[in-house]
Image: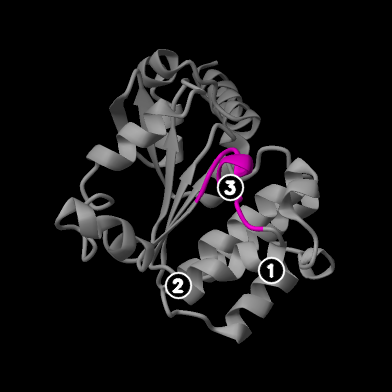
Amino acid sequence: MCGPHWQERRWENDSGEASQRFTETRPGIAEGPWSGHPQNIGFEAGQHVGFAWQNPNDQLFRTTVREEVLTGPRVLQAYDPVWCNRLFERLGLGPLLDRSPFSLSEGQKKRVSFAAALASQPELIIFDEPTAGQDDPFRRELAELIHELQRERRTVVLVTHDLEFAAKHASRWLILAEGQMIADGSPDMIMANHSVMGKAGLRPTQRFQLIQALKETRKEGEID
C-alpha cells in the first residue's frame, strides 16, 4: 500500500489467526522500507508501523501508562513530546498516566494500546478491532483521530467486525473468509454482493438495507 488510505479488513473468524495471516501475506504491508533480513524486520518495522492489538492485555508490559506509551518512541529515537501530549489529551489518558495499565478497565487499556501504537508517529497504523468495548463518544473521537492521521498522509488499516463503523469511515473494504481474501472494493459494492457477504457470514448495515429497500419500492412504483 502507498499513500493515505482507510483500509478495512473483515472476516468471520474471531481467533485472530486471519489477521496474522493477512498481514504476513498481503503486498504492501509485509513489503516496504522495513523489509529485509528477518533479524532486522522487528526494529525497522517499528519505525514505520504501529499496531494496536485486539486484546490490549497481550500488548501491555510496563508499570505505568506513561512508560507504556513512551517506551516505543524513546527506543526508536522518535520521541516528540508535543505529539505524545496530544495523544494523551485526545485519548483521555491524562489522569491515568501514573497508573498501572493493568489496573485499568478493558476500554481504558485499549486506549493505551492505541496511544502506544501511535506514539512513534508511524507511517502505517493497524488497529485490530478498535471499537470493541468502546462507547459512542469514543467511537466519534476515534473516527476524528484516524481522519486526522489520514490528513497527515498516514496509512490506516482497520481490522474490524463493526460494519456500521467501517461503512461510515472506510472507503475501501477487503473481505477475508477462511483465511483467503474474497473481495476488494467499496463498501456499497461489497454489501451488494450477496455471494461474498454470505460466504463471509456478514449482513449489510441497516442503512444499506434501507436504501436498497427504497430503491426496490421505487422500481416497483415505476413498473406499476
Asked if labels 1 and 3 touch by Cβ distance under 8 angstroms, the answer is: no
Q: Residue furthest left?
A: 37
Judge whether residue 16 is colored magenta.
Answer: no
In the image, which disc is placed on residue 66? 1
Q: Which region shows up in magenta?
A: 52-62
The residue that label 3 is drawn on is 168
In the image, which disc is placed on residue 75? 2
Q: Position of residue 62 (x, y in %)?
A: 63, 57
In the image, which disc is placed on residue 161? none
Judge whether residue 58 is colored magenta.
Answer: yes
Which secondary structure lies at badge 2? helix
Q: Position of residue 207 (x, y in %)?
A: 63, 34
What's under tag 2, amino acid-wise?
Answer: Val
Q: Is residue 169 above or below residue 131?
A: below
What's under tag 3, amino acid-wise?
Answer: Lys
Q: Position of residue 107 (x, y in %)?
A: 75, 45
Kindly report the distance in space between the C-alpha atoms of the residues bearing marks 1 and 2: 14 Å
Q: Earlier in the sequence, mark 3 or mark 2?
A: 2
Q: Is residue 32 left or right of residue 56?
A: left
